[in-house]
């Protein structure tokens, strides 16, 4: 085998290995509320040796520049990629965020904070309605059900208060005192 053929054979193996990871990222990136095509884009930027422009991304993935723009916006909002500056280059350049913990934390905080606040508001609203019903009902069975429902809501409220504490630990970085970040193996 000539050295040129060997090079291309090895290059294909490299691309195959990279594609294995990119495919898995694309399959699971929905957990970050990101499309699989944006996940493929992330993998492409992740393995790039240098920051990429939207044109570079579009060429690498054979997709429209508009699709790349939409995908890169979602990845930027999730802190999975960041815009970088390069002297002499007027185009926007992007590279993968190297701190995976930061990306996860930001997505976790945003999604769970919103859901927790919505659920706590629903608990408060429901408690008000149930308390009003408890005061006005003349049926013992209904009052018993209200009391049970209020107990259930109390348990849910305690859970969401705990979850708010967990979210706060991510916001402050205190979570990493309990579960330290792992250092890469060489």
Image (cartoon, rainbow, N blue to C red):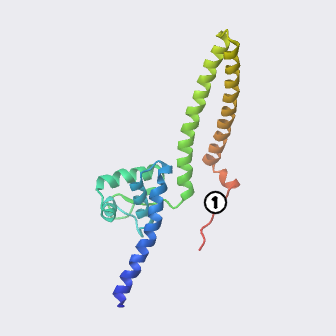
| Quarter occupied by the N terminus | bottom left
Q: Residues within 10 Å of mark 1 (few under 14, many from 20)?
A: few
Q: What residue is shown at x 52% (from left), y 48% (from top)?
A: 107
Front residue of 133/123: it is 133
Instruction: Estimate the x, y position of residue 175 in percent, counting from the top left.
Output: 66, 51
Tell me the quadrant of the picture where the C terminus can be found: bottom right
Residue 144 horizontal/vertical position (percent): 71, 19
The answer to which quarter of the image holds residue 178 is bottom right
Q: Residue at x 44, y 69 (%)?
A: 18
Residue 48 in view in this figure: yes
For residue 33, above or below residue 164? below
49 left or right of 111 in image:
left
The spot of residue 131 in percent (x, y) is 66, 17
* Residue at image mark 1: 181
Please tell me which residue lies in front, 30 or 93. Answer: 30
Q: Residue at x 52, y 53 (%)?
A: 103
Figure label count:
1
Question: In the image, what residue occupies the spot 48% across and 61% down?
Answer: 24
| Residue found farthest to the front | 141
Q: Position of residue 19 (x, y in %)?
A: 43, 67
As helix, strand or loop, the secondary structure at mark 1 comes to loop
Q: Is residue 84 visible?
A: no
Determine the residue located farthest toward the bottom in the rendered image: 1
Q: Nearer the viewer, residue 118 or 178?
A: 118
From the viewer's perspective, is residue 90 above or below residue 130?
below
| Residue 62 versus residue 29 in the image, above or below | below
- Residue 92 occupies which quadrant of the picture? bottom left
């Amino acid at each position: 085998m000539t050295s040129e053929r060997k090079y291309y054979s090895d290059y294909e193996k490299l691309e195959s290995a990279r594609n294995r990871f990119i495919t898995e990222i694309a399959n699971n990136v929905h957990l970050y509320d990101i499309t699989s095509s944006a996940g493929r884009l992330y993998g492409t930027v992740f393995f790039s040796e240098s920051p990429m422009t939207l044109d570079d991304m579009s060429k690498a993935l054979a997709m429209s520049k508009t699709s790349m723009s939409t995908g890169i916006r979602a990845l930027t909002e999730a802190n999975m990629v960041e815009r970088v500056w390069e002297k002499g280059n007027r185009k926007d350049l992007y590279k993968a965020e190297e701190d995976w913990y930061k990306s996860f934390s930001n997505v976790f905080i945003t999604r769970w904070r919103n859901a927790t606040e919505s659920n706590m508001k629903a608990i408060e609203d429901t408690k008000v309605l149930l308390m009003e019903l408890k005061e006005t009902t003349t049926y013992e069975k209904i009052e018993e059900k209200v009391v049970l429902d209020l107990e259930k809501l109390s348990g849910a409220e305690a859970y969401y208060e705990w979850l708010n504490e967990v979210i706060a630990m991510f916001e402050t970085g205190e979570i990493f005192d309990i579960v330290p970040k792992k250092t890469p193996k060489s």
